[in-house]
Image: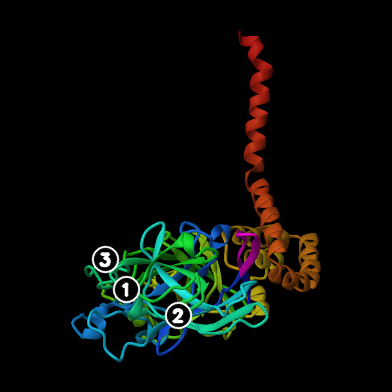
Amino acid sequence: MKKILALFLLISLSSFAEEVRWEIDTDVYAGAGKDHKVVFEAGAADGNSFTNAHKVYIPMQDYSVQDGSLGPASNTDYTILSPANTVPWFEQTPTETNNSVVKQSLKVTTSEGDDLYLWAGLKKNDSEVFLYADPLATVKKNNGVVIYRDMEIRVQELCAEPLAACIPIDRKGDDNLRQNIEVVLYFFTAPTDAGNSKYVAKDETVAIADIPDGTYFKYLLSNGVDLGTDVAVLDNLIKGDARLTATYSGQKISQMNDVIGIVYKTPPPATSTAEWPQASFADALENGGAIGSRDNGISIPGQFFVKNLTNGEDYWVGVAFVNKWYFATLVSESKNQVPEEIETFLETRACYLISAGFKKDHHVLDYFRGFRDRFLLKSEWGKRLVQVYYGSAPKYAQIIWQNEILSQIVRFFAYLAYFLMRYFPVMALVMLTGLVIRKLWPSYR
């Protein structure tokens, strides 16, 4: 489990130096009945101020899903988390059924001599926090180390506070499923002994200056979905050996986190225009789709690979963009392709090296096939040259096919040869004409 050293401060209290160090576990989970790993971003300057707070992105399902007033187009149709009904939620009238929590782990090392307890203060302003709950953990210090594992923050309890302003997290309209709530907690350690000078208690407003050496967390709660059409566009689908290469473009969404490929083994539902309509993630899965590629980065335009496919079978692929709350855009219209064994592809195209470089039918490939048929195969020496080429090229073609750098080199020289062979006579004629004109021009001046 990855760890980030989140805060290291040296402070002076009277004549003694007390050292406090926090270690923040980067694996943070949230859910309602099931824990989902959520996006965590370590804050700048070790999270030691409000502006440099660590960020946790908490997906929230529309409250209207829970009270039954929402129609079929809810944001749970767009989450890639499964099952969708385990996404956290908040309700204005609390019930016992709401088990939405955030789980994380902290470790504190300190030279403090008293037994310590973990507190969380809800940010009230730049200098004060409100202690909205009892200590989150009551673990005694052991050799200067206090570890709080699987600490639970209940979303309902946190959002119920007026300072959090979560009421309600719901959609604003059919075309704008987005509401972002920002809640800041300040974690610190303090004793619960009323006789201690650092004593604090629930429902108090405490000055941050009186509880130094803490660390800030910013919880970003959102039901945000980008529902614009053609946000994600699949441009091309290239066949390979048991794999497909998809190239895409589109518009970068707010807080973009990932690009996913949706793969079908049967044609998606068609419309009157014989095109697959853009669908929600839930619709895509319901119609036989599955996530075929994840963790593709956020570059636009870009490409991703769908691997471990069966050669000779039809596949349809679409693309969607995902934000940091794991809500996806509409899935793009799909494209169809059939993976093919390297040997089959190369043998049917015959021009081995260039075929391996382009990995698909291409006008440059067609040109060299024509050059072979129209010129080389018309003479004995040309036929011998073709026979030698076919005797040695296949084994090198497979190496080129599997190495993208070699494929790029082959494509470069293929383009260069294509340009010279096709346009050199014209260029030579233009240059010769220019030399003749330049030679004769003085005679006519």
Tell which tag, 1 or 2, sits nearer the viewer: 2
* Residue 137: image location, x then y, percent: 50, 83
Between 162 and 140, the residue placed more toward the observer is 140
Lower position in the chain sequence, tag 3 or tag 2: 2
Q: Amino acid at mark 3?
A: Asn
Q: Is 229 within the magenta?
A: no
Tell which tag, 1 or 3, sits nearer the viewer: 3
Q: Give the SS element for disc 1.
A: loop
Circle 3 Cα neighbour tier, 10 Å, few/some/many (<14 / 14–19 / ≥20): few
Lower position in the chain sequence, tag 1 or tag 2: 2
Q: Which residue is mark 2?
A: 135
Q: Give the SS element for disc 3.
A: loop
Identify the magenta region.
6-21
Q: Which residue lies most toward the top here?
A: 445
Q: Which residue is mark 1?
A: 277
Q: Give the SS element for disc 2.
A: loop
Write down the quadrant of residue 160 in the picture: bottom left
Q: Which residue lies most toward the left here?
A: 69
* Residue 225: image location, x then y, percent: 34, 69
Q: Amino acid at mark 2?
A: Pro
